[in-house]
Amino acid sequence: NRIGMELTIYATLFSLTILLLLKSIHKTSFIIPAFIVAALTLYTYSAGKLLSPLLLIGFLLIHYKTFLAHKKYTLAGIFIFSILSIPLILSFLDGTGLARFNMVSIFAANFPLQKTIQLIIENYFIQLSPGYFISGEPTFITRHFIGGLTPLLTVTLPFILIGLIHTLLTLKNNKDSQLLLYWLLLYPIAGAVTAT
């Protein structure tokens, strides 16, 4: 990450969760640490509160045979994740955990439902457009684009394209490709519900 903020630790723990989940497919001792790190991710950055549980759900669905075969570890991991989530859930119930969301959420603008849905869809697909990756988000907030740097370096674009083509071609029979596509489709969700 090019800047120092809570997003840095979020990205690190989110990626570590995926690494531990991938390792848990072959070694069950990684299942519980994966759920612990996923729970810690909830407390790092606002997006983690939404995306960490969605990551776990998607991963469990993609690799359901593996996790069903190791039900004891999986249930223990889910239980630990739930216990570690209790303070966050309590903060949601009393409103303090939603304070930031209520400030930056698209729902705070009180648009009509149709307009809100339209904006969420537009925000989601903007983040998947090539223009977004090459020139960045059209925003007045410049802290993410220091010194003219864009979200992706131009030199990485061919590799991203090759990876995307490979992922799509192997999607049917390759669980890693399914996970990569799920991760790609998952990441814009938090930004989609944020007011720009």
Image (cartoon, rainbow, N blue to C red):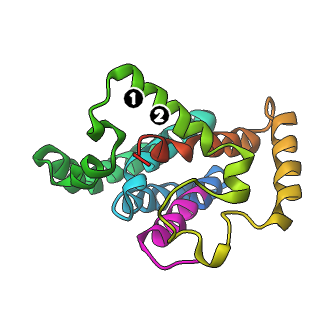
**Nearer the observer, 84 or 167:** 167
Which percent across, then down, holds residue 64?
58, 34
Looking at the rendering, the stretch of residues picked out in magenta corresponds to 1-18
Compared with 116, 86 (above or below) is below
Compared with 113, 141 (above or below) is below
The stretch drawn in magenta includes residue 11: yes
Q: Is residue 20 left or right of residue 76?
A: right
Q: What residue appears at the point 22 percent right and 48 percent down from the top-left corner?
A: 89
- To which quarter of the image does residue 62 belong? top right
Compared with 85, 16 (above or below) is below
The stretch drawn in magenta includes residue 195: no
User: Could you tell me if the residues under marks 1 and 2 are in contact, i.e. CB atoms within 8 Å?
Assistant: yes
Mark 1 to mark 2: distance in Å?
A: 6 Å
Q: What residue appears at the point 53 percent right and 78 percent down from the top-left corner?
A: 3
| Secondary structure, magenta segment, majority class | helix
Residue 67 visible in image: no
- To which quarter of the image does residue 48 belong? bottom left
Give the structural element (helix, strand or loop) at label 2. helix
Residue tagged by mark 2?
A: 120
Going by the numbered disc 2, the residue's amino acid type is Ile
Which percent across, then down, holds residue 156?
82, 63
Residue tagged by mark 1?
A: 116
Q: What residue appears at the point 81 percent right and 32 percent down from the top-left corner?
A: 173
Residue 188 visible in image: yes
Disc 2 residue crowd, few under 14, some 14–19, many 20+, Cα 10 Å: many
